[in-house]
Image (cartoon, helix red, strand yellow):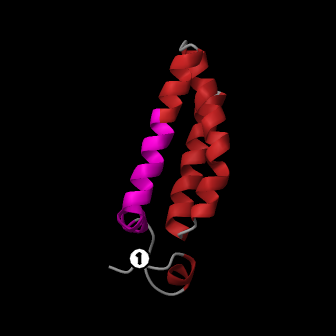
Amino acid sequence: MQGIVLLSVLLLIALTSLALNRRALIAASLLTFIITLSFVLNRVGIDGLNIFVTVSIIIGSGVVLLGAGWKTARRMVLVFFPRGGTWDRIFPPEPA
């Protein structure tokens, strides 16, 4: 349960860093995400090599998808934040 809560918090941090347009926050939490995902998969009952393969596929595909679609993903996240004033300074709009 603790691992799933930590994964949820890390995903929330990733969405926030996406809205802030800061790739460094995602890169900084990547190692913690890998370790936590490995822990959760181990608790589920997956063994060593399968954990490595599963985590590598999840992290690798996530990095490639974010690299290719950063602007699109950011626009999707910014829909949830109000526009105008201070919000535009905190979460600058993504140019089209």
Q: Local crowd at mark 1 within 10 Å, few (<14), some, or many (≥20)?
A: few
Horizontal and vertical percent for residue 25? 63, 59
Left or right for 88, reference 2: left
As for residue 75 lying within the magenta part, the answer is yes
In this view of the protein, which residue sits in the foreground, 91 or 86? 91
Residue located 42% across and 68% down the image: 78
In depth, the one of 50 and 72 nearer the eye is 50
Q: Which one is nearer the viewer's eye here, 48 or 29?
A: 48
Q: Quadrant of residue 9?
A: top right
- Residue 81 location in percent, x, y? 45, 70
Q: What element does badge 1 sit on?
A: loop
In x, y percent, where is residue 41?
A: 55, 22
At 65% across and 49% down in the image, what residue appears?
29
Question: Where 31 sits versus 68, above or below?
Answer: above
Q: Residue at x 38, y 81 (%)?
A: 95
Segment colored magenta: 57-79
Residue type indicated by callout 1: Glu
Residue most toward the bottom? Answer: 85
Q: Residue furthest left?
A: 96
Q: Is residue 86 above or below residue 5?
A: below
Query: Which quarter of the rendering shows the N terminus?
Result: top right
- Residue 22 colored magenta? no
Residue at 61%, 37% in the rendered image:
34
Q: Is residue 56 above or below residue 28?
A: above
Q: Which residue is mark 1?
A: 94
Give coordinates of residue 80: x percent, y percent. 41, 65
Magenta highlight: main SS: helix
